[in-house]
Amino acid sequence: MVKVTVWNENRHENKNPLVRSVYPTGIHGAIAEFLRQESFEVRTATLDEPEHGLTDEVLNNTNVLIWWGHTAHEEVRDEVVEKVRLRVLDGMGLVVLHSGHFSKVFKKLMGTTCDLKWRDTGEKERLWVVNPGHPIASGVGEFIELEKEEMYGEHFDIPTPDELVFVSWFEGGEVFRSGCTYTRGNGKVFYFRPGHETFPTYYNADIQRVIANAVNWAKPVERNRPVYGNAKSLEKISSK
Amino acid sequence: MVKVTVWNENRHENKNPLVRSVYPTGIHGAIAEFLRQESFEVRTATLDEPEHGLTDEVLNNTNVLIWWGHTAHEEVRDEVVEKVRLRVLDGMGLVVLHSGHFSKVFKKLMGTTCDLKWRDTGEKERLWVVNPGHPIASGVGEFIELEKEEMYGEHFDIPTPDELVFVSWFEGGEVFRSGCTYTRGNGKVFYFRPGHETFPTYYNADIQRVIANAVNWAKPVERNRPVYGNAKSLEKISSK
Amino acid sequence: MVKVTVWNENRHENKNPLVRSVYPTGIHGAIAEFLRQESFEVRTATLDEPEHGLTDEVLNNTNVLIWWGHTAHEEVRDEVVEKVRLRVLDGMGLVVLHSGHFSKVFKKLMGTTCDLKWRDTGEKERLWVVNPGHPIASGVGEFIELEKEEMYGEHFDIPTPDELVFVSWFEGGEVFRSGCTYTRGNGKVFYFRPGHETFPTYYNADIQRVIANAVNWAKPVERNRPVYGNAKSLEKISSK
Amino acid sequence: MVKVTVWNENRHENKNPLVRSVYPTGIHGAIAEFLRQESFEVRTATLDEPEHGLTDEVLNNTNVLIWWGHTAHEEVRDEVVEKVRLRVLDGMGLVVLHSGHFSKVFKKLMGTTCDLKWRDTGEKERLWVVNPGHPIASGVGEFIELEKEEMYGEHFDIPTPDELVFVSWFEGGEVFRSGCTYTRGNGKVFYFRPGHETFPTYYNADIQRVIANAVNWAKPVERNRPVYGNAKSLEKISSK
């Protein structure tokens, strides 16, 4: 059974009644709830827990980590960020949601600024599937429509994705590469754009399907990690 | 349960006693046997059956097609080739083995000559995993070593693979991109290099693991196919 | 000096007074005119010339071929298509414009249907640069805006592009991967979406800049072609 | 004229007489010399200069930076590393050579460990061209052969390259992705494997050709950088 940890900053929910009314159990609570219906083994972790809830014990027992953060990226301690990064390189899957594009861990794994255009007045987003055979798009129609979302626009300063699964159309005139896969070390990373805290995006059945698909796609493979460093030759070297 | 059809030209086995001694039930028989142990639903089809064994009924009930051909590529009828190509675009997975690089169906799906260097005197091949997190490499060590194989060398005239999983080292001094994935329409294609008819390659446990992994990777997703053609606008067009 | 041949079907211009009024010297004439200002060596060729204007002499003296076709794809003779394809594999650059997505030569090089959604009522298109360091986007702002264009929408049934340079936003609600690069053999291919025959798109300075950039990007490199076929070993093979 | 800065750690040359005998003007001196013959504007910079020779003035006047380091990666100051990274994101090309795979700047741009297998006893390397139409391979034959080099072997822990240009064969039985391109922000990065300090690799004409090609490939394009942050809508948003 795939072990999933849903990490959430959990600040907007505590400070903003509007957000709390949308996500009474927190964004992590809402995500955990629908993932549990997929028969994953799900736990949650939040910023204000000790070690942000990401102890060695938790990380070593996580196959796929889901990350939502926004207002407090800088409060995430560097040693926790580095632990998460190393776990990804070791094989743990990572699903980065929405404003997580600016999280320390995503930026460190990407190497770029991960900057973008944004506008949070609420407008229509339509996520088009551009890779219909990809398992992350399984069960989804030609597009997913969200009546109200924050806009994220190009240029999105990310490395070229290994695979591009979704491209968003925004009412205000922008486009965005909104579903992107990456390989980092032995780990797989999926960035998925939607999910502003004031809109009920994570209750949308298609969005839930994509996140559940992403968990299945990102889970580690069964194999020993590569060996690095000084290596004896496998063949005779003639010159010696 | 994934439905697999193993297609084999099955000519070497009938004409060359050496090949028949290596593969008494044919290359298709050997491949079908180990795939059945994975609890796939497996059938075989060969060139000399009516419609090459690839009737509409067979193709429509195949989730993943495995293809081995060599000496008789030209005898595969164009209408069957086109049917297979359309099934791939419709979502059927395709695993092309070894000399299948020159099959009509692979060349049509690639658009290039698919030419390469070769030498069939039997030499050591070592397939290195260059994408350790890829599900097709699951359960395999850092490399797969084959004591005797035909050499295929670069330049391999294929489109840039979507993903490169294996790179081969050959004793005679060449390298080869020997595990390559592609997306074509709704279908997934995996090319896997090893398997010359005079060597017992398909009895190698690692080679069997890779082919079984590839079947799981290439199986179709559950979704409706995209709609093409004239489309009504989803939004009001201001100028009209 | 880069030798460019601009190929155009040239049928709409002869049959439709509206198109002729937009492009009095043909689409090929308009494209050739701005390319000549870049100090390329430019010639044109059209469907109704002998061999469609693409004789061996012309093709062998073309570094980059530009292709516009729409209503008469089926009239392009298969042997000319195959000659063009082989020249691309041999290193000739190919820039496919707009409705050329359905040309025989593009479909053969891609291996897929190259199908898409379309609507030709005229609406706003905004092409966003998603790869700002790419030479094909040199000299262009964050986006190119076209007041009236035909819509092309996803899913666009092409292989995963090697590089994605532009993504289009359409007023009617669709997106499109509108600037895509491919490698095929020794040749480079660029697909660029805009250019419906009833709109003055090829007079737009940004569109002209992209096409000129694409010619420079697609020109062949200076090197001998790879050698294919049976190869002697470069190293001693121990087992022999 | 492209402005190139060749950066070298320049420690082996000062401490090891063997290295000094191979590169009497330093590795930077040898690289600068052949690049000057390409009519680039070339300067050099080394670790022990103030600010490692990479002042704002130097970096702002560098179109392409070449990087060689090995024994003193940790001595490169973090603020210089960050300046170089930001210049790459801003458009400066970066060519990372050999042991530079472990440089701070390459690791920060990649996000991974950049680890690999190695063996420095001196053995034959053969770099095969796997992308014959790529401008970085222009003027080079099917492979480049180096009689004595350090071995670097897979798995090479890098993100999937945007483009793979060379794959190395090593006498001792390994392979390596030895010519890899990346896009980071507005900048282009090329990693090129050869160049151990005790071997005369940078005097090899093919190696020189590749590095000069890489400079031309990596030079910035002419365009304004994208705008990030809060953005006004380009279209009317119906719901407001």
Image (cartoon, coloured by chain):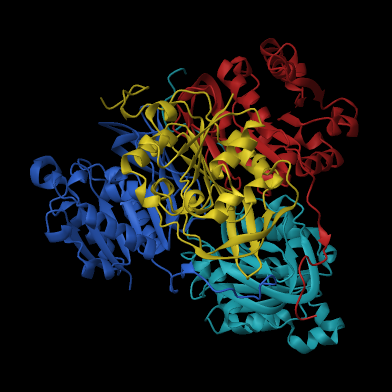
Chain colours: A cyan, B blue, C yellow, D red
Q: Look at the image and tell me whether residue D8 can be seen.
A: no
Q: Position of residue A232 (x, y in %)?
A: 50, 33
Circle count: 0
Q: Position of residue D35 (x, y in %)?
A: 70, 18
The residue located at (38%, 31%) in the rendering is: C55
Q: Look at the image and tell me whether residue B77 can be seen.
A: yes
Farthest-out residue, front: C17
Check the image and report above or below for C65 versus D34. below
Q: Quadrant of residue C184?
A: top left
Front one among A159 and A78: A159
Front one among D146 and D228: D228
Q: Position of residue D59 (x, y in %)?
A: 84, 33
Check the image and report above or below for A180 versus D8. below
Q: Position of residue C232 (x, y in %)?
A: 31, 23
Q: Is residue C156 left or right of residue B207?
A: right
The residue located at (41%, 45%) in the rendering is: C105
Q: Quadrant of residue B196?
A: top left
